[in-house]
Image: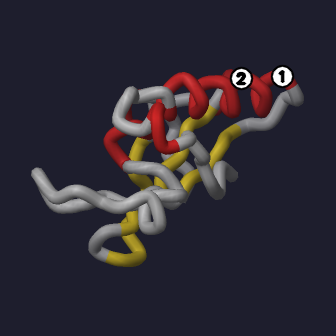
Amino acid sequence: MISCLYVSAPHRRSRLHIPMIHAACDFAAGYDLRAVDAYPVDPPEGKHVGADNAMTGIASAFRAAGFTELARPKPDRPMMRREFGSTANKTLK
């Protein structure tokens, strides 16, 4: 599970978090893990989320990195997953 992403202030809004997510997934896949989960924040369209609330990542970045939404325990907190290998694109609920 990716629980936190940290990008220093000068590099925020540079979309650097997307390659960070890819790197974490590549690392996990290298150890033959089947999937990586994340619980990012999904702010309303056009609303800025401060770094203190976005440390788990932004849902759009996880979507861009190949994650799909599995559930939404809270209105602004989707449960997302990226699967690897033969389990990819199969929904595990």
Q: Are marks 2 and 1 in contact (CB under 8 Å)?
A: yes
Report helix, strand or loop for mark 2. helix
- The picture places residue 5, in percent across and down from the top left corner, at 59, 47
The amino acid beneath tag 2 is Asp
Relative height, residue 48 to residue 14 (above, below): below
Mark 2 nearby-residue class (10 Å; few <14, some 14–19, many ≥20): some
Q: Count of labels shown?
A: 2
Mark 1 nearby-residue class (10 Å; few <14, some 14–19, many ≥20): few
State the colouring used for the structure image. Answer: secondary structure
- The picture places residue 66, in percent across and down from the top left corner, at 45, 29
Relative height, residue 57 to residue 21 (above, below): below
The amino acid beneath tag 1 is Gly
Q: Which residue is mark 1?
A: 30
Q: Which residue is mark 2?
A: 26
Residue lying at 69% horizontally and 32% vertically, measured from the top left:
24
Relative height, residue 52 to residue 63 (above, below): below
Residue lying at 67% horizontally and 25% vertically, measured from the top left:
23
Q: Is residue 71 in view? A: no
Using the numbered discs, state the Cα–Cα distance from disc 2 to disc 1 in whole angstroms.
6 Å
Quarter holding residue 14? top left
